[in-house]
Amino acid sequence: NPEMKGLMTRPAFREGAGVLASMGLSLDVWCFHRQLPELTQLADSLPDLAIVLDHVGTPEDRSDEPRAEWAALIRELARRPNVAVKLGGLGMDITSGIGTNLRGQGSDVLAKLWRPYIETCIAEFGAERAMFESNFPPDNDAGSYGATWNAFKRIAAGCSEDEGDALFRRTAARFYQIDLGG
């Protein structure tokens, strides 16, 4: 959408985001991967604002060359300590490679398809700034709610207990100021 191009660089947007920072709140941003440089600029201009990138920065195309471009943009964004990433949203029927042509997949297939994106994000942001997300009903285009969470469990199987705790709950609790008690 041409109206959205440059949105995060507009003074009014940054002013509004600055209000969130002054209130100690976070900003969730869903953008396509080619908009990640704008988000990086926003994070630089508001270092006190906690920003959460939704849906791994939604790669617009899942072939090799765009994936490499996406990974480089994720790497650069991850250098901003005020940004975290939500791991999910890869089942929406808005990008190639997932969606209507793969409806109803099991967790094994979803884990295989999503692993390169999720593992890249975890490697760049670390478990302390990455969190699994539920993106339902849109992710239902690829697989059920249970299949999605089981795919996340498969992907995180090699993580330590502490990393898994961060990915599945602690990071989200910290960024969204949720008291986990005890």
Image (cartoon, grey):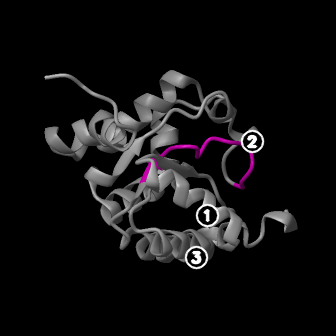
| Separation of residues labelled 3 and 2 (CA atoms) | 31 Å
The secondary structure that dominates the magenta segment is loop
**What distance separates the C-alpha of mark 3 from that of mark 1?**
18 Å
Q: In the image, which disc is placed on residue 37?
A: 3
Q: Which residue appears at 34% of the width and 56% of the height?
A: 122
Depth check: give the residue in front, 168 or 26: 26
Q: Quadrant of the C terminus?
A: top left
User: Residue 76: x percent and y percent?
Assistant: 43, 77
Q: Earlier in the sequence, mark 2 or mark 1?
A: 1
In the rendered structure, the answer to whether residue 107 lies left or right of residue 124 reads right
Of helix, strand and loop, which one carries label 1?
Answer: helix
The magenta span reads 85-96
42 and 32: which is toward the camera:
42
Look at mark 1 in the image and give the residue it sits on.
15
Give the structural element (helix, strand or loop) at label 3.
Answer: helix
Asked if the residues shown at circle 3 and circle 1 are in contact, with their CB atoms under 8 angstroms apart, the answer is no
**Residue 108, image x, y percentages:** 45, 36
Q: Residue at x 27, y 51 (%)?
A: 127
Asked if residue 127 is among those painted magenta in the image, a careful observer would answer no
Q: Amino acid at mark 3?
A: Pro
- Dot in front, 2 or 1: 1
